[in-house]
Image: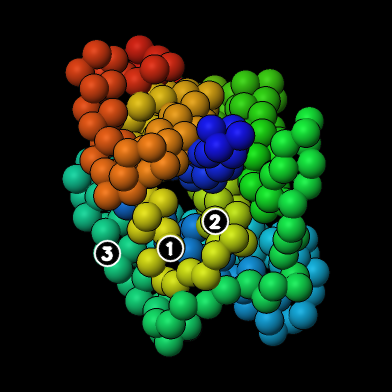
Amino acid sequence: MLFVDQLITGISVGAVYALFAVGFGIVFSTMQILNLAQGVYATAGAMLAYFALTELDVPFVVAAILAVAGAALVAVFVDQLAFQPLRRRGVQMLGAIIASIGMWIALREVASIATNATPVGFPSNTVPRGLIEVAGVSILKTQLLSIVCAVVVITGVYLLLHRTRVGHAIRAVGYSKDAAQIAGINPRAMIIGAAALSGAITGLSGILLASGQSFNFTLGDHLLLQGFAAVVIGGFGDVRGAALGGVLIGVVQTMSAAYISSGFQDAITFGLVLVVLLWLPRGILGSANVVRA
């Protein structure tokens, strides 16, 4: 049963990475920005949920909804403040990366001040706790919550991008803003929508990660590394690839810690990234055109 327990733990951790990777990938696909401030959205989601639970005394579900909405607003704020002026001036990716680093540092400092740089945690009576039996296997409720949220949200995002007019418009902007505009699409509106969607998904990943442990203002930094690795492994151009990469990293990390050593889990994970880059430069499911969502 140890292997099964570790596998479930790996999948639940990977589900959180997958959500972050999907949010990360949406920004890159739509705006061609390697947004290093993406981790801040996860921290914002966790922090806002914490304050909603402790200050507003609302149920966990309500706190999560408010926090996801707040993370979406933070993402739109960052996009319009840091990236929109660069897009208007035609600045290329390097300028956007530098701007995202600036926003990362600034918002990280805000989170540090808001919590006095001390670890916090969701009140124990507000988050689903305990074990639940699924097909004869005991699973923590927080693990099941992460897996269910990842499946539902990632499926919904995939259907949104590939089965709706709004999704087609967002993907069209990712291909070419000029061509999309000729077709009657408002690129700025689609980019704002994509930023909000990305922030909401990333904020949810932060809430799920924080629900099982104490956390501080650096929560998003860890997710940024794992999420970036997940997107590289799965492929920048495909939501399914980003999700697959996230789950794969979660399982590899957990199995490495359980059967080899926790000290090697990051080395093994990023070794896996190098192997994938050597054999599959576009990732496992990456398309020929990396700007497609």
From the viewer's perspective, is the residue at label 3 or at label 1 nearer? 1
- The residue that mark 1 highlights is 219
Residue 174 is tagged as none
Residue drawn at x 55%, y 51% as measured from the top left: 205
From the viewer's perspective, is the residue at label 3 or at label 2 nearer? 2
Q: Position of residue 149 (x, y in %)?
A: 68, 43
Closer to the camera in the image, 194 or 9 = 9
Quarter holding the N terminus is top right
How many other residues sit within 10 Å of disc 3, few (<14), some (14-19) or many (≥20)? some
How many other residues sit within 10 Å of disc 2, few (<14), some (14-19) or many (≥20)? many
| Residue 11 in view, yes or no | no
Q: Position of residue 230 (x, y in %)?
A: 40, 34
Residue drawn at x 69%, y 44% as measured from the top left: 139
- The residue that mark 2 highlights is 209
| Distance between the alpha carbons at the discs numbered 1 and 2 | 8 Å
| Distance between the alpha carbons at the discs numbered 3 and 2 | 25 Å
